[in-house]
């Protein structure tokens, strides 16, 4: 027996922390860390639903694998963009727009 | 409260604390390293919830690949070593961000917690999971492989942007460094 309140609470906390990380960071790579936390909150919710019996086609686990794959694709493109921005501007500070 | 609840509470507290440190620390590289701890303990949560394969994939792909990519990006963008205040926004902005983050937490918790109930943990059999993955989910699976290919090509194409300018900048920096006699790296 496991009570689902724990996983649900951790999901909410991770999503909140990720939102804070996206909003409160100026370094573009650290913003990505916040995005990763939000994605992990989503996958944790999927897995905890999968842990309760009765999800068809093991959807919770399979969709978690898919989200992890999409996160890997997302982070590779995002880091390529960050590197291009660093080459063009010399820094990756998101709060100082420059011409 | 069963043993599984206690085990989940243990790894969950580690995950939440390291997540908090990952978004608040003033050391750039420490943020990536705290992310390792957070993702690793989320993998532990998956184990407690009975999803072994997902936990292994989390360790392999997230901790193994994504965090290494993030560390590479930090190094290639010349991340400063030591505490820096300028990697975060100003105090007012951070307070607003904290209020919004807390709002997200409260909103999600107020929606999800009334749905929570004790369940008999349903352990996912890897054989069943792989059979479903390659029968019911085979088309999304194939489309995802296409997505990974597109992401690979896009990352290569995007990382070429600005390469010439960067070369010019690198030449200038190298010449300056040689002038100062401070270069220790082979060019």
Image: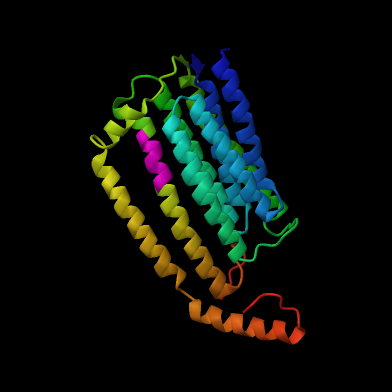
Residue A54 part of the magenta-drawn span: no
A50, B178: nearer the viewer: B178
A38, B157: nearer the viewer: B157
Residue sitting at x 45%, y 21%: B115
Residue sitting at x 49%, y 77%: B163
Residue A68 part of the magenta-drawn span: yes
Residue sitting at x 36%, y 25%: B125
Residue A23 visible here: yes
Residue B54, by quadrant, is top left
Residue segment shown in magenta? A62-69
Q: Position of residue B124 (x, y in %)?
A: 38, 25
Residue B105 visible here: no
**Residue reaching furthest to the front:** B186
Q: How is the image coloured?
A: rainbow
Q: Position of residue B45 (x, y in %)?
A: 53, 29
For the stretch drawn in magenta, the main secondary structure is helix
Quarter holding the C terminus of chain A?
Answer: bottom right
Q: Position of residue A32 (x, y in %)?
A: 54, 53
Residue A94, by quadrant, is bottom right
Residue sitting at x 54%, y 18%: B4
* Relative horizontal placement of residue A70, taking residue B177 as reference (left or right): left
């Amino acid at each position: 027996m496991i009570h689902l309140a724990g996983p649900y609470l951790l999901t909410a906390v991770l999503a909140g922390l990720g939102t804070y990380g996206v909003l409160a960071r100026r370094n573009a790579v650290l913003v990505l860390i916040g995005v990763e936390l939000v994605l992990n909150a989503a996958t944790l919710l999927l897995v905890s639903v999968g842990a309760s019996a009765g999800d068809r086609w093991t959807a919770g686990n399979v969709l978690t694998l898919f989200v992890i794959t999409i996160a890997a694709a997302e982070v590779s493109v995002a880091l390529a963009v960050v590197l291009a921005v660093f080459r063009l501007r010399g820094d990756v500070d998101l709060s100082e727009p420059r011409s | 409260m069963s043993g599984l609840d206690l085990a989940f509470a243990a790894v969950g507290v580690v995950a939440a604390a390291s997540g908090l440190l990952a978004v608040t620390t003033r050391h750039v590289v420490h943020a990536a390293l705290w992310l390792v701890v957070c993702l690793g303990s989320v993998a532990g949560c998956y184990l407690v919830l009975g999803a072994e394969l997902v936990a292994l994939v989390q360790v392999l792909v997230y901790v193994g690949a994504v965090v290494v990519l993030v560390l590479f990006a930090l190094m290639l963008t010349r991340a400063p070593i030591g505490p820096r205040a300028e990697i975060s926004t100003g105090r007012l902005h951070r307070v607003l961000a904290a209020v919004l983050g807390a709002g997200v937490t409260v909103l999600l918790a107020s929606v999800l917690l009334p749905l929570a109930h004790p369940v008999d943990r349903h352990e996912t059999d890897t054989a069943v999971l792989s059979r479903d993955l390659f029968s019911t989910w085979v088309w999304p699976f194939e489309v995802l492989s296409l997505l990974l290919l597109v992401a690979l090509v896009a990352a290569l194409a995007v990382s070429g942007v600005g390469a010439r300018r960067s070369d010019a900048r690198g030449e200038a920096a190298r010449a300056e460094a040689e002038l100062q006699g401070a270069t220790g790296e082979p060019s």
